[in-house]
Amino acid sequence: MYKLYLEKNTTSKELLNKVLKENNIQDEIIYNAYGKPYLKNKALYFNISHSGIYTALAISNKEVGIDIEKITIKEKVIDKICNPEEKMLIKTADDFTKMWVIKESYVKYLGIGLAYGLQNVDTLSINNFILETIDDYYLAIYGDDLK
């Protein structure tokens, strides 16, 4: 089970501190080798993303990854993040942004972030995610137990 927090015009640190306080969690934040933050005692798992005016935070009792991006197409990075099959599917900014947030939420879930190489993530085979539209943004949450 997960819970999503979404706020406008707030920093990641402010939102995380607010959520930890609301849940009465006083725990040290530590980081893995790739920079993914964790609570030392793993009372819960969380992941944060921000884009434009939005900051999104997902908390769960299991690993979770989240990404939010303004709907846009970045022609210069398509070759860096997409495999050949995915490239053929990109027709619009919507297509590109959906692929981007799914990939990024997945590698953040794994705890390795962009070091994994987004072109190594095949969005056609990923299925443990939720995709939402918020204004002109896409938000993806990836995890083992999202429902």
Image (tube, grey):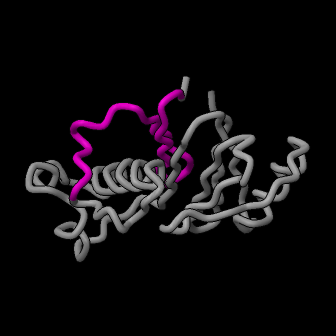
Residue sitting at the far front: 41
**Total residue callouts:** 0
Q: Looking at the picture, does residue 72 appear above or below residue 132?
A: below
7 or 79: nearer the eye?
79
Which residue: 76% across, 57% down?
16
Which residue: 65% across, 50% down?
57
Residue sitting at the far bottom: 76
From which residue to which does the magenta span run?
120-145
Image spot of residue 93 (x, y percent): 31, 58
The quarter of the displayed image where residue 23 is located: top right
Residue 82 as seen in the image, left or right of residue 10? left
Q: Looking at the picture, does residue 30 appear above or below residue 63?
A: below
Which residue: 89% across, 50% down?
21
Image spot of residue 26 (x, y percent): 88, 52
Q: Looking at the picture, does residue 141 appear above or below residue 118?
A: above
Which residue: 53% across, 27% down?
145
Image spot of residue 37 (x, y percent): 62, 60
Q: Looking at the picture, does residue 58 appear above or below residue 3?
A: below
Residue 19 as seen in the image, left or right of residue 115? right
The quarter of the displayed image where residue 116 is located: bottom left
Residue 144 as seen in the image, left or right of residue 43? left
96 or 141: nearer the eye?
141
Is residue 129 located in the magenta-colored stretch of the structure?
Answer: yes
User: Which corner quadrant holds the C terminus?
Assistant: top right
User: Which corner quadrant holds the N terminus?
Assistant: top right
Image spot of residue 30 (x, y percent): 68, 63
Is residue 91 located in the magenta-colored stretch of the structure?
Answer: no
Residue 54 as seen in the image, left or right of residue 137? right
